[in-house]
């Protein structure tokens, strides 16, 4: 892809967007990452410019075992991060494909899905492990745009 950082395809024809995703994967294989960030958006990037690579980067950077990382998502571009985390949670509004890729499914984002996931799956696990279960008390999250933040 040379100097191109990202190609975004947009269409109201959701079937065409899904077909373009498959075609990009078939044509370019491991040379690109092609995933839908919304049903109507197709993002084509460098193969390591995806949410799965972000999980791996955060794990290395902050010394957090991937098994201790929880990821929550609702779109096909979240599946790669699900594969790199210890616990993956799909939102209830996610497609069946995305839900199958996750270990757990929470309620929809319109029904407090994120909060419900944290209350049901994250906080009880942390309580069972003890308050010191997180590495150095650090919390790293990815936002909906794919960027990351670090908090203590």
Image (tube, grey):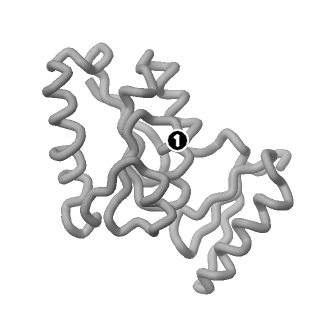
Please state, as top left, top right, bottom left or bottom right, where the C terminus lies in the image: top left
Residue 21 lies, in percent from the top left, at 70, 66
Question: Which quarter of the picture shows residue 131?
Answer: top left
Residue 53 lies, in percent from the top left, at 58, 36
Relative to residue 28, is residue 106 drawn left or right? left
What residue is at 64 percent from the left and 43 percent from the top?
49
Which of 39 and 119 lies nearest the eye of the viewer? 119
What residue is at 73 percent from the left and 66 percent from the top?
22
Residue 38 lies, in percent from the top left, at 51, 68
The answer to whether residue 6 is seen in the rendering is no
In this rendering, is residue 140 above or below 71? above
The answer to whether residue 58 is seen in the rendering is yes
- Residue beneath label 1, please? 83
In this rendering, is residue 45 above or below 10? above
What residue is at 17 percent from the left and 36 percent from the top?
123
Question: Which quarter of the picture shows residue 149?
Answer: top left
In this rendering, is residue 19 above or below 26? below
| Mark 1: secondary structure | loop
Residue 23 lies, in percent from the top left, at 79, 67
Relative to residue 118, is residue 62 drawn left or right? right
What residue is at 81 percent from the left and 46 percent from the top?
31
In this rendering, is residue 12 above or below 2? below
Relative to residue 127, is residue 100 drawn left or right? right
Q: How many residues crowd around disc 1 within 10 Å: few (fewer than 14), some, or many (20 or more)?
A: some
């Amino acid at each position: 892809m040379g100097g191109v950082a990202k190609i975004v395809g947009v269409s109201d024809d959701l079937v065409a967007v899904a077909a373009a995703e498959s075609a990009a994967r078939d044509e370019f294989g491991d040379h690109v990452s092609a995933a839908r960030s919304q049903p109507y958006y197709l993002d084509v990037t460098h193969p390591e410019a995806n949410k799965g690579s972000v999980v791996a980067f955060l794990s290395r950077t902050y010394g957090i075992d991937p098994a201790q990382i929880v990821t929550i998502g609702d779109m096909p571009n979240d599946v790669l991060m699900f594969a790199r985390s210890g616990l993956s949670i799909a939102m209830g509004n996610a497609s069946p494909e995305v839900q199958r890729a996750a270990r757990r499914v929470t309620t929809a984002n319109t029904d407090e899905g994120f909060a419900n996931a944290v209350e049901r799956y994250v906080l009880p696990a942390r309580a069972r492990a003890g308050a010191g279960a997180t590495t150095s008390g650090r919390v790293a999250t990815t936002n909906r745009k794919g960027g990351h933040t670090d908090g203590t």
